[in-house]
Amino acid sequence: MAAPPGDKALQFNNGTTATERNRAVGQAITRLVIGNWKMHGKLATNQALLEALAAGSMSLSGQCHLGVCVPFPYLAQAQAQLQGSALSWGAQDVSAHLGGAYTGEVAAPMLADFGAQWVLVGHSERRAMHGEDSALVASKAQAALNAGITPVVCIGETLEQHDAGHTDAVIADQLAPVLALGPQALAKMVFAYEPVWAIGTGQSATPDQAQAVHATIRERLAAFDAADRPILYGGSVKADNAAGLLSMPDINGALVGGASLLAEEFLRIAAA
Ligand code: PGA
């Protein structure tokens, strides 16, 4: 695992290194599994899916927290159906602005009106198809925090960047404006490492590959007193590969796309 320069020299009184200590912190974090429905859904099918997930999430309590990020129009449905259940809900994007002449945008206080607990920011599909850069992603994260919503900050490298060995540099660049928001803001965030080449391809990162990147992310967070933040892995997580990924010390949960639309599969991931 690549540790930042100088880290190995940092010893604590009890003889543990910062890396070991951060890892212990990572292992103590309650598992969080969030579904990203993307642009899928229909009132009738959502109802059945949410019913099944709400019922299934009751038996998970304590060992894993389950959430779903639904398309904006279905937030009201999620709120009506999930209020009082163990399943939380949120959105997949948010405006960096508080309100005003921003046609088509949705502000964080609007998400809060519908009880959203989570909002994805910086998903690779938004970065790639809507030109969102990391500075904008950081502004969106701050807007969410201002409304009392937890931003799930998504980061990850493309296949070209991966093959060129640039993963760490890309992650560092994507994180920089978010880290600049400071420890107080970071203390309320969740992070998701989603290698772009693994999203929707059926080709997940291996547990070792993902762990290595998660460990470097945790090191970067630790420099801002945020080593205890959940770091989720996303990218072709399925019931049959979840156990391997989720058993890694720095992987605190999963951000699940396709498999989150199938109640049984999604619940098996959460229980893996
Ligand atoms: P996937 O998507 O699980 O379908 O690969 C993950 C995501 O985009 O969050």
Image (cartoon, rainbow, N blue to C red):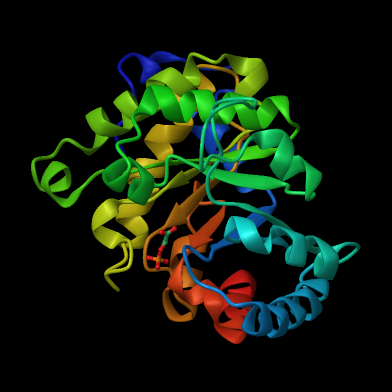
Q: Residue at x 67, y 38 (%)?
A: 150
Asked if 101 appears above or below 269 in the picture, the reply is above
In this view, 261 is above or below 64: below
- Name the residue: 29% across, 37% down: 131
Q: Quadrant of the N terminus?
A: top left
Question: Where 7 falls versus 112 (above or below)?
Answer: above
Q: Quadrant of ligand 1?
A: bottom left
Image x and y of residue 215, in percent = 42, 39
Whether residue 28 is visible to the viewer of this picture, yes or no, is no
Tally the numbered discs: 0
Q: At 66% from the left edge and 35% from the top edge, which residue is drawn?
A: 108
Placement of 135 over or under 73, stated as above or below: above
Q: Residue at x 42, y 34 (%)?
A: 217
The C terminus lies in which quarter of the figure?
Answer: bottom right
Residue 68: percent from left, percent from top: 64, 62
Q: Nearer the viewer, residue 26 or 173?
A: 173
Question: Outermost residue, right direction?
Answer: 84
Which of 176 and 218 lies nearest the eye of the viewer? 176
- Residue 241 visible from this viewpoint: yes
- Considering every residue shown, the one lying at the far left of the view is 164
Q: Quadrant of residue 72?
A: bottom right
- x%, y% of residue 106? 59, 41
What x and y, as percent, mark residue 124?
34, 47
